[in-house]
Image: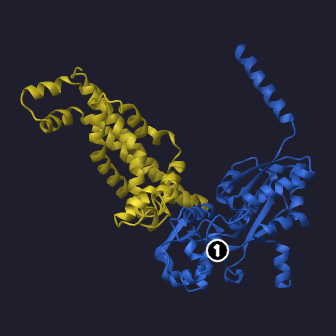
Chain colours: A blue, B yellow
Amino acid sequence: MKIKKWFGFILLFTFTLSAEAKPVHVAVAANFSKTMQTLVTEFEKTSDFQIALSFGSSGKFYAQIKQGAPYELFFSADQVKPEALQKDGLVMAGSRFTYAIGRLAVWSARPDFANQIETKLKEGSFNKLAIANPKLAPYGAATLDVLRHLALIAATQSKWVRGENIAQTYQFVSSGNADLGFVALSQLIGRNKVEEGSYWVVPDTMHHAIKQDVVLLMGAGQSLGAKAFLDFIHTEQAQHIILQNGYITSDRLNSEQGT
Amino acid sequence: MILSDGDMATIWLTLRLATTVTILLLILATPLAWWLARTHSWFKGPISAIVALPLVLPPTVLGFYLLLAMGPNGVIGQFTQALGLGTLPFTFWGLVVASMVYSMPFVVQPIQNAIEAIGNRPLEAAATLGASPMDRFFTVVLPLAKPGFMTATILGFAHTVGEFGIVLMIGGSIPNETRVVSVQIYDHVEALEYAQAHALSGVMIVFSFVVLLMLYTFQRKRKAVGMTYGR
């Protein structure tokens, strides 16, 4: 009898909680975390919906969503995982679109490397080159494109240290363990200032576009909040914030390419 | 075989790392455990706490601070550079040092417990028979504390094999240098290569089970033997 009573209490408690305004659960690729926080702050100024953010690697989110994780929106770091989810039938039809296109930068925390990053890279005068693991991170795959374009693969390969994601690559450079590193431009300019060192923005003609897609997941059901937030991402205001944080937006890319 | 050459390389590297770490830890931990077991010094508490710290700290936190400390601007980094060794992150020996910190409590504590269990009497008896301190250690302590050393060896080895967070932070995933099995499994999962991840994880599970089975079979025997020695 006692157990039943407790069970009832717990049930009651759970339902009372869920009766409150439910936040929209959003899974966000780590490279987009700072930009996303700015976006959410802007969104919540004009909306009653609350956004609950989870940051992590796209690969982990993919595995979790397949196993029924309660996310309503998924901002991936690439196009592969949203496409795969779409094939798995876990995505609302017609919701997928490219919310941002990443830019690469070569960054050094060393003061004496200031304004000569590109030269140092090409000369090979550095101890280690931090890159995101090309197998896992879209920024890593793009880094390989750049090194291939510059014909630096063979010359630099022995100096590569691989971060599991772009945040770890950033750490390798900021802790001074690697003289140079290929990181996301958004990691450098999203802050109020670059803490230390300097960077060279890699021309985006040197690598395939790092397109990042968002999808509305089946788990969202009829959630109005998730739709409202996705609509917000389409607005000019949101696109402007994304641009300011070191990404290209897909409208911009299309107009540049004249399509 | 589903395991690729890359997977096999990570297995060998992991075994090499765990073996190196275990041997070095046994050499380092034995005097430390001896001292902790016998001392009445005021330092016993603080030193024990420091040895046990890795049990509490999240590995990624430990790894992050090791990355900073071993880096060119860190305390350890400055020291290794002064010795002309360069810096430790992204090297095999960097992983060895980090793993030693991380697995230290698993090696020190079983040895310490075993030595404490022996007590003073056998040692005093040996001393009255004219055994030197060295003699006493090799002919009395080592044989009596053998189960403790076995447990320490197995736990230290197994714990190093299972290590992930620290290696992830300071390793840089360099093939044949710092890319160990646990990192390889993580890479497979992140890259959505689930079949390879399953295969390698399968190997890990079988290995871990065998190691733990050895440990517990050994401990059962040890209890039976232990009965014959009073405190």
Q: Identify the residue at horizontal 17%, vertical 36% (top origin).
A: B137
Residue A29: quadrant of the picture: bottom right
Rendered-image quadrant of the N terminus of chain A: top right
**Residue furthest front as drawn:** A112
Residue, disc 1: A199
Q: Chain of mark 1?
A: A
Can residue B171 be seen in this snapshot?
yes
- Looking at this view, is A256 or B67 the one in front? B67
Horizontal side of A72 relative to B186 (left or right) equals right
Q: Residues within 10 Å of mark 1 (few under 14, many from 20)?
A: many
The residue lying at 50 percent from left, 81 percent from top is A124
Residue at 74 percent of width and 64 percent of height? A190
Quarter of the image with the C terminus of chain A is: bottom right
Q: Secondary structure at mark 1?
A: strand
- Residue A230, quarter of picture: bottom right
Residue A48, how many percent across, how many down?
91, 46
Q: Amino acid at mark 1?
A: Tyr
